[in-house]
Image (spheres, rainbow, N blue to C red):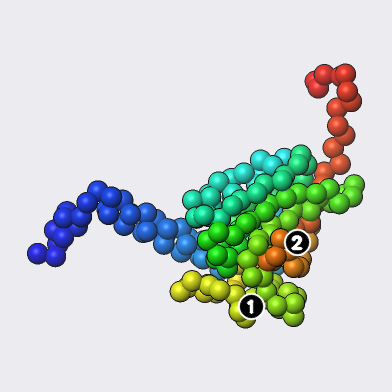
Amino acid sequence: GSLDSDSALSPEDRHANTQAIEREVEYLNALVANLLDMSRIEAGVLRPDVELYDLDDALTQAIARLRPRLGGRQLELEVGPAVVRIDAVFLDAAVANVLDNAIKYTPADARIRVATAIQDASTVRLTIEDSGDGVAEEALPHLFDKFYRAPGARGGSRGGLGIGLAVVRGLMEATGGRVTARRSGIGGLAIDIDLPLAAVAPVPDGEAAP
């Protein structure tokens, strides 16, 4: 009967089924987390747990989690050393949302670039950009509006709720950051996340750290 049809599947098919289910669960978990974050942002009850983190380390986890979903997309990392004053969980969620957005709206052979650049003594800019189609100039200011979905973006069958980038801005502003969107130098969309740099004095050359 139909009950034992699963046992007729090859191990490869079963594995593929399991992976598909895991992806759906991950997607739903992320969606629920975003909805919860959005409601907390709107209620003004986000309580960031701000500490000093090495930005490189803080980014590694979110990137590693999304790597399996990149497909043929080429991920370029240009992340320099920077100590930031952030809530690591908020940053992780923000980076995951921006990368998820880039994956969702780019063709399978696109480039996705994650780069950091020191702006001044108090700010480091984290840029996540892609070589996709981008969005219309007039859509850029609205990308962070709740439920806004840019026209012309090529999505799969599932378009999402249009809250990912709204959550990114809310999470980062709660920790003293700033988020803006612009056209990317590599063709698509660029999201800039400005984070507070920690004023940590470097160890002078020739002196061992204690």
Q: Callout 1: few (<14), some (14-19), or many (20+) C-alpha neighbours within 10 Å?
A: some
Tag 1 and tag 2, C-beta contact below 8 Å: no
User: x and y percent of residue 201 in the render?
Assistant: 87, 34
Q: Which mark is residue 30?
A: none
Front residue (pair 196, 16): 16
Front residue (pair 176, 10): 10
Q: Quadrant of the C terminus?
A: top right
User: x and y percent of residue 48 in the render?
Assistant: 69, 54
User: Identity of the amino acid at label 1?
Assistant: Ala
Q: Quadrant of residue 148?
A: bottom right
Return the residue at label 1.
150
Who's the residue at 74% across and 80% down the image?
138
Pick whichever of labels 1 and 2 is earlier in the sequence.
1
Vertically, is 201 above or below 97? above
User: x and y percent of residue 61 in the render?
Assistant: 59, 45
Q: Indicate the secondary structure of the residue bearing disc 2.
A: loop
User: x and y percent of residue 79 in the render?
Assistant: 72, 44
Using residue 174 as the reference point, say whether residue 26 is left or right of it: left
